[in-house]
Image (cartoon, rainbow, N blue to C red):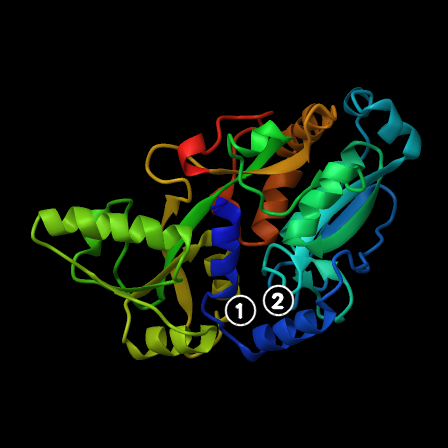
């Protein structure tokens, strides 16, 4: 099963922190159904990109100065350069995945860390970003058909996907433990610290698979922990707030999002430790995804590296509370999840 599908399911089944989240979800659901729905995106002044716009408190709105770098835009395929646009694919329908991609507080503008990065990359390439929002399945149909140039939609780099696509990495693919802010427990990268804990996880997800593997290892040492499942977001939140569970194990972006949303609530939460979504043997990577042999992966990677070198990348991540998923460099087709775990 593709790792992103698992993680995406968990992003939707994580803890809902505020009524604002529920409002966003209702708005997004109303937009669902269309396989390639048009969603407005914010238009910035020339030479600037506003990240975190209309995020309903999920990000700190930040205006970044970004100009075309001719040496990088010269690498673009001729057809894209002559067209003057970069068609950025986002798979946010029907419900979105805050803080990665969702409909903003105006109930019509697509926002999130992923479309923001697409716009930053387009600026470095001297292209006008055209953001196409679709379902996850139609995101790949768009790339395959050439209607989408490159997807920025939390796609995990895997060896299986390399058969059809080329990648430019831009973020670590991490899972995280969410605990109440007052909790003193931390994961510290060691599954043995889970002994005696009660942990909620989404059924059928990649994180459940990893958690159950840790439980089996601990059992051999005569120790254990309790795994619990809840039907919906509110039930998980109530369990965490009431002490029925010690932590929730899910995708790092979802944990980061809820920490910003519930910071001023009676039950604020925090990140208590991360783990690679690819498991212990490889650091999972999220990558911009283009059709294989399209010639887009290298200029996109070079654009991302330009953003890294000039500080805009760090500011983009910080705005969305995702600094703990930063990569040192964007790589073209880096090692991905192996074929036996893709």
Give the left or right position of residue 111, taking residue 70 as reference: left
Q: Of helix, strand and loop, which one carries label 1?
A: helix
Above or below, 206 against 255 in this view is above
The residue that appears at 79% across and 27% down in the rendered structure is: 69
Q: Mark 2 = which residue?
A: 57
Give the left or right position of residue 91, taking residue 127 as reference: left
- Classify mark 2: residues with Cα within 10 Å, few (<14), some (14-19) or many (20+): some
User: Percent x, y for residue 138?
Assistant: 70, 50
Q: Mark 1 = which residue?
A: 261
Above or below, 130 against 179 in this view is above
Residue 115 appears in the rendering: no
Q: Nearer the viewer, residue 304 or 149?
A: 149
Residue with the most extreme right position: 82
Label 2, label 1: how far apart the Cα atoms are: 7 Å
Residue with the most extreme left position: 222
Whether residues under marks 2 and 1 lie with C-beta atoms below 8 angstroms apart, the answer is yes
The residue that appears at 58% across and 43% down in the rendered structure is: 155
Above or below, 143 against 231 in this view is above
The residue that appears at 69% across and 48% down in the rendered structure is: 139
The numbered dot on residue 29 is none
Give the left or right position of residue 3, taking residue 165 as reference: left
User: Percent x, y for residue 327?
Assistant: 52, 35
The residue that appears at 74% across and 58% down in the rendered structure is: 35
Q: Nearer the viewer, residue 129 or 295?
A: 295
User: Percent x, y for residue 64?
Assistant: 73, 45
User: Percent x, y for residue 10?
Assistant: 47, 59
Residue 328 appears in the rendering: yes
Q: Which image quarter: residue 79?
A: top right
Q: Say which label, 2 or 1, has the lower sequence index.
A: 2
Q: Of helix, strand and loop, which one carries label 2?
A: loop
Q: Which image quarter: residue 147?
A: top right
Q: Nearer the viewer, residue 68 or 19?
A: 19
């Amino acid at each position: 099963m593709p790792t992103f599908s698992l993680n995406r399911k968990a992003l939707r089944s994580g803890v809902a922190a505020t009524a604002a989240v529920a409002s966003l979800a209702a708005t997004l659901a109303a937009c669902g159904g269309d396989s390639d729905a048009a969603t407005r995106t914010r238009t910035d002044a020339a030479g600037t990109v506003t990240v975190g716009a209309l995020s309903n408190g999920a990000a700190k709105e930040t205006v970044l100065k970004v100009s075309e770098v001719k040496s990088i835009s010269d690498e673009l395929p001729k057809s894209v350069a002559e067209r003057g646009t970069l068609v950025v694919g986002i798979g946010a329908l029907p419900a979105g995945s805050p803080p990665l991609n969702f409909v903003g507080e105006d109930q019509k503008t697509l926002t999130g860390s992923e479309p923001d990065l697409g716009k930053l990359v387009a600026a470095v390439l001297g292209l006008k970003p055209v953001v196409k929002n679709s379902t996850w399945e139609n995101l790949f149909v768009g790339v395959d058909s050439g209607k989408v140039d490159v997807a920025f939609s939390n796609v995990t780099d895997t060896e299986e996907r390399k058969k059809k696509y080329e990648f430019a990495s831009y973020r670590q693919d991490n899972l995280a433990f969410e605990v109440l802010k007052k909790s003193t427990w931390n994961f510290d990268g060691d599954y043995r610290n889970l002994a005696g804990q009660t942990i909620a996880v989404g059924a059928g997800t990649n994180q459940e698979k990893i958690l159950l593997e840790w439980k089996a290892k601990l059992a051999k040492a005569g120790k254990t922990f309790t795994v619990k499942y809840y039907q919906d977001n509110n039930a998980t939140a109530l369990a965490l707030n009431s002490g029925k569970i010690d932590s929730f194990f899910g995708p790092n972006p979802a944990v980061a999002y809820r920490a910003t949303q519930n910071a001023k609530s009676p039950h604020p939460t925090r990140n208590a430790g991360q783990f690679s979504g690819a498991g212990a043997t490889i650091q999972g990577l999220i990558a911009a995804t283009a059709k294989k042999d399209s010639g887009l992966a290298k200029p996109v990677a070079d654009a991302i590296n330009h953003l890294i070198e000039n500080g805009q990348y760090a500011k983009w991540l910080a705005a969305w509370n995702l600094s703990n998923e930063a990569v040192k460099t964007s790589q073209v087709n880096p090692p991905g999840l192996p074929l036996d775990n893709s």
